[in-house]
Amino acid sequence: MFWRPDGLNEKKTAGVTSRFLLAMTWGCYSGRIGNSHMRLLWTSDIHLNHVDFPTWDQWLLALCEAEADGLLITGDISESNDVYFQLRRLADAFAKPIYFVLGNHDFYGSSIARTRQQASALARELPELCYLTDSAPIAISDSVYLLGEDGWGDGTRGDYQGSPVRMQDFEQISDFHQVDRDLWQGLIQQQGQQSAARVRAKLSSVPDSAQTIYVATHVPPFCEACWYQGRTTDENWAPFFVCGQVGDALLDYAAEHPHIKLVVLCGHTHYRGTAEMLPNLVVHTAAAEYAQPEIESSLEIH
Ligand SMILES: [Fe+2]
Ligand SMILES: [Fe+2]
């Protein structure tokens, strides 16, 4: 099945939903963009609930004036129901393909499952939106693919038990605040496990003829990609700022496919940095500042 950003009919097939529910059964890539070259604006952690209207207008103007083919957002779009309002507003105003994953803040005020279901439903309704977590890999050309996954700080790196850090997530997301705190570590590990399973399944559905795969995710998959003020994370923050199981999936795939380059784009820490994990695996982490959404970079994909 082919999916195009402008292909409303094909996108609205029931297959999109079933692929999400049966996350391990990604059969093949969902579609070719149609051009052999694409310029995507990449932004992350825009936290639009903190942005006033004049600033939002300026940001949108910058997006439009860049004359790109689409926008990629690596999570933390807003919080609670405002996420859908903001996505709808963006789709309407930008009027070009918007590829996105969700970040931990996007789940605030709801549950993880319900938020993802609503994001999926909105993406099926609006042809501009593509929720990458609920999408098979997208073929941009014969050799370049784009896939995405929300990811989660999964408690598999750093020292969860010894850390004094506990995220707002545990208070703001119903999956956590409805259960005993002793269960939190298991829940975040489970989220990371599910994210990694989806990433492995999507990667395995990309043809071996691929040369480059862009992987959009919210949470850095490695400690080395978890930047804060020019340094990488310590043992206290790593459990919540690294999705180690997705990192393992990426390392395995990159080692088994040395001819394919993985370019990972993530956010979450709000500090910029690049980590070269293997000759064919690089991770770029985007900077962000509350109330001041920016364009992190313009990606020339071909
Ligand atoms: Fe953020
Ligand atoms: Fe985040």
Image: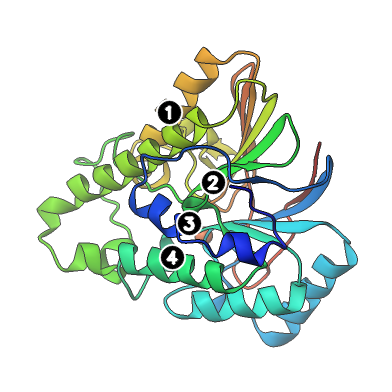
Q: Is mark 4 within 8 Å of ligand 2?
A: yes
Disc 1 vs disc 4: Cβ atoms closer than 8 Å?
Answer: no
Foreground label between 1 and 3? 3
Whole-angstrom CA distance, mark 1 to mark 2, is 13 Å
Q: Secondary structure at mark 2?
A: strand
Q: Secondary structure at mark 1?
A: helix
Whole-angstrom CA distance, mark 4 to mark 2, is 17 Å
- What residue would you read off at disc 4? 105
- What residue would you read off at disc 1? 249
Q: Amino acid at mark 1?
A: Ala
Q: Earlier in the sequence, mark 2 or mark 3?
A: 3
- What residue would you read off at disc 2? 148
Disc 2 vs disc 3: Cβ atoms closer than 8 Å?
Answer: no
How dense is the environment of label 2, judged by Cα within 10 Å: few (below 14), some, or many (20 and up)? Answer: many
Residue 243 visible in image? no
Q: Nearer the viewer, residue 44 or 239?
A: 44
